[in-house]
Amino acid sequence: MVGAGESGAATSSPHPEVFIPPWWAEAAEAIARASSPPPVALVCGPKNSGKSTFSRHLLNILLQRYERVGYLDTDVGQPEFSPPGCLSLHLVDEINPDLKNPCIRPPERCFFYGDISSKRDPNAYLKCIFSLYDYFIKEHYDPNEIGSPGKSMLPLIINTPGWVKGTGFDLLVEMLRYISPTQVVQIRISVESKNLPTGTFWLDGEQKGPVDLIDIFSARQDSLNRSVLIQKDAKVMRDRHLFDYFRQCFPSDLNIVTNKELAHALASLPPYEVPLSRLKVMHLHCQVPSNEVFHSLNATIVGLAVSSDGPAKSQYCIPWCVGLGIVRGIDRSKGLVYVITPVPYSSLRKVDLLLQGYIEIPTGLLQVIPLKYVDAYPLICLLRCCTRYQIKIYRGEQLLPRH
Amino acid sequence: METMGSAGELSSGYKLVPWSSWDQWNFVRESIFSSSSDSVAAALRRISAWRSRGCLPVPIEITAAFVEIQQKDPFFSKEPMVDALSSEEMLAMLYSMAITRLVNGYVEPAHKKTGRSISELAEAVGIPRMLVDIRHESSHRNLPSIRLVRLAGIKALDWLKSNYWEPQKKMIPDVRKEIRSRLHEMTYYLKTKSAQKSSSEVKGKCVKRRSLLTRCNKLSLQITGMLLSSQSKGSEKKISKTARIITRLYSAYPTEVASVLLELFHLQAPDFSDGTDMEISDDSDVGDPWPLTSSVHVLKTIITTLSDKKPRLLLSILKMVLETIEAKESVKYENGQCYFLSPEYQAEICQLKHLCSLVPWLLTKLRALKDAGRIGLINKNMVLSTDRNSVPKVSLTKLLRKCLTLSVTGDKHLTDSVMLLAEMIGNNSLKERLKKLPLLGSKDWDSIEDPVLASTETMCSQEEDSLKIAAAKLELLKLQFQNHSNRSTGPVDGNTDTSNMWTLAKSWIPCPIGMLPCSFSSTAVLPVLDKVDEGLESMKIEINNDKAVSDQATNKSDLDSHTEPWENGSAIKKLKPTLKEQELDFPEIKFPMEGRLLIDGIWKKVSEQELLAIESNIRIFV
């Protein structure tokens, strides 16, 4: 299934073109045919089996019949249209023929979950997804709710993470039970032990209404009918996504191609300055001693949110996130925080809450200024700390024996 | 060219660490093994801040775990503890888990790769066998006894100390030491060079005389000449090589280089008995009264050479000199009366003068570079300019302001510097206004205070003149005072409006993410994150995960209370917007002395009423 990775591989890697096998095309057509009510299709399957590629294909097929299509991304490590750490609902209205590369799109609604895996806080993860789903149903699906004649019901695609064992499986079951999709697409690979159980595995006996089960095999096989999976470097993918996201701080006609150029541009960009006294900071996954907050916050990626603006129904959820920012500096004597963000001013002006998580800032963004001079000098080469929060190997790891 | 996000560019051998400088790391290393419980607590707090950044190295994490467990263990405390864990079972579990994580943290990656046994790999790394056994026993068999794991905990901490903390500490290169040795090297080369030069002059003369006597010596003369020239060429090369190295060091550690240079300057300070009123000629090195071998001169040559390559070095040093002067001044006032008589105070004064004398010299160098086009002045809206050697005008104005504040002490060098800066900025009206300031016009005072020769009449007229001048100055001051108070009312109200919370920084000097631009020297500095500012104490930060935005009701009240500290905020806060305003449009800049009068040698703040009163008094006199 080369080229059909969950999210397109980096341009530099030698992957063949994306291949949509006939049984995939057929499955997508079948889903698109189910017109009333519009399909709510959930795509699941093990890692690297091609969930994202299928979802992208399905999205394009549905866009031939609908003006807009909802897309709920639950893969928090490698979301399709958002930077990592975000759970978001998108309304897509244009066909993207490039099935290989994920691209950044502004979300309809988004949560900053703040980690790359659901395992850190399964409950919060589920609550975010349920809130996004509820929002979609209320605004774009439920005929009793959307009311106004101009609005039509929209189909929804739900892409899921490839974590299908243990807690990951439990979470998938919870999700399926809550959402009860009209179509469930399960992608299976040849290694049977890695697959999900067949059938309506999420229902224990009690039937909840009709559901179309569509089992498809992964796109590519070798001569022995074994699935060919593409291993992707998840960290590289994430960093790339973050680069794409913060690239939006600059007009697209500005020639920024390499990381170095972006790092330099970000270092030069006049940031927003926000009074410390009017911001709240909240760490989503751990407690920070109150007098250490700034040590924790400086030079990190944060979610920007308006503390009073959360989903109406749910009581336990964090507020909506309007986008990500980089806390590029803190000046305590002036009482200011400096933030870089591509979020437009109109949605930014009310932001009063910084959500901190474990989304690491790519080291490439920290490497500005004349590194090349430093490299020429052996003593500093060891240290390389001419910028913040970047560094060399620490001793603990170096001591490990090499085999 | 590698494209954005490609693997090669991203994995460039860097590792993200949670500390911003090795000083911070060292602070934690020293504190966590300290005997003071406050220090240990501070280290643990810092480590939890690091943990929240998500890239904490395993050895640090485990060290913190063991220290924290020991704090809970009644065995390690002399007096009964409040938060002690009484269940030995629980303590044993904590110890066992920490030990398991230590062993796995070091061995797991290699174990996955090679498939060799844990104990085999642990032995290769040097982890005590005891720890490996406890890991095995606690995961697969019975929970080991508390006595055993307690002992193992001590062992594990020792092991971490000698296998992570100590070796890592040794790995941190001492940048200052390196800079110092390079500078000494350069000083040495420069001195030998000048020594050679003078000796070759002498030699040359001798040879000349001799050659008049006998022409047969022509050959030897040539040889000597060749030898000499090759020698001086060699030292020339060495000098430029060392200069290159220091320049590279400067690009990585601007503040360190500047401060070491200054430190050397301090050491070179002449014996104060005779060196105090040395004058540094402004125009060139030729007229320098100091012999070539003088260390101060050598140091200045070094600075000149370096600043030729890195013009901003001058700004860095300037900033540091001014800050040092400022610090010394404040110490002077704090120490009180009796201190003034002590010999240390005399030495201090000399040091200060010595430092002050450096300021105008640095400025003339800066001007020379500017005139030569090596450094350009740019306006603040051109910050994105690609030219690295451009200095925003804002930097100069900030320097000027600082000089002016410090010149309150009446140091001539500093007042000279103020004028130099004003000239460089090229703002004539500013220059005129500066001249009107009493301090800068102080040169005239000498003539006034010469009563022996002056007749009473001239004295009277002089006095009258000076009174008139004083009246004019008061008028000026009053005007500025009014301007100021008019302007200060406006923006404060506007700022309480929530819509202005996010504003784009008006001026910005490029600097790496996580650092702040320093407006004086236009280099980047690490922000001070520890300082507890009075104005910020009212700041409310919700870190409690569940409480923060749990439900809409508290949410609202949170928001309400959030605006409160701003509205009730101290005067400092309310002044902030106006201060910002001032920075933005330069010609209107008010000086720190604004609204102040020199009364009994102290600059006192005066109100408009007081000004009026004084003014009327003057009229009566005249």
Image: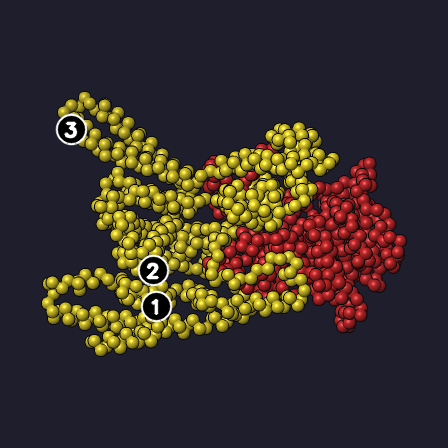
Is A337 or B219 nearer to us in this picture? A337
Which shade of the palette goes to chain B?
Answer: yellow
Same-subunit check for callouts 3 and 2: yes
What kind of element bears circle 2? helix
Would residue B437 be seen by someone viewing this image from the given angle?
A: no
Categorize mark 1 by other alpha carbons within 10 Å: few (<14), some (14-19), many (20+). some
Q: Earlier in the sequence, mark 3 or mark 1?
A: 3
What kind of element bears circle 1? strand
Return the mark for residue B405: 2
Q: In this image, A301 relative to B484: left or right?
A: right
Percent across and percent down for residue B302 are 33, 42
Residue type pointed to by label 3: Arg
Residue at which label 1 appears = B605
Q: Residue at x 66, y 28 (%)?
A: B120
Q: Residue at x 47, y 71 (%)?
A: B491
Percent across and percent down for residue A350 are 59, 66
Q: Which one of the lettered chains is coloured red?
A: A
Residue at which label 3 appears = B209
Percent across and percent down for residue B543 are 60, 57
Percent across and percent down for residue B589 are 37, 65
Residues under numbered marks 3 and 1 in contact, where contact means CB atoms less than 8 Å apart: no
What kind of element bears circle 3? helix
Residue type pointed to by label 2: Thr
**In which quadrant is the N terminus of chain B drawn?**
top right
Residue type pointed to by label 1: Lys
For disc 1, the chain is: B
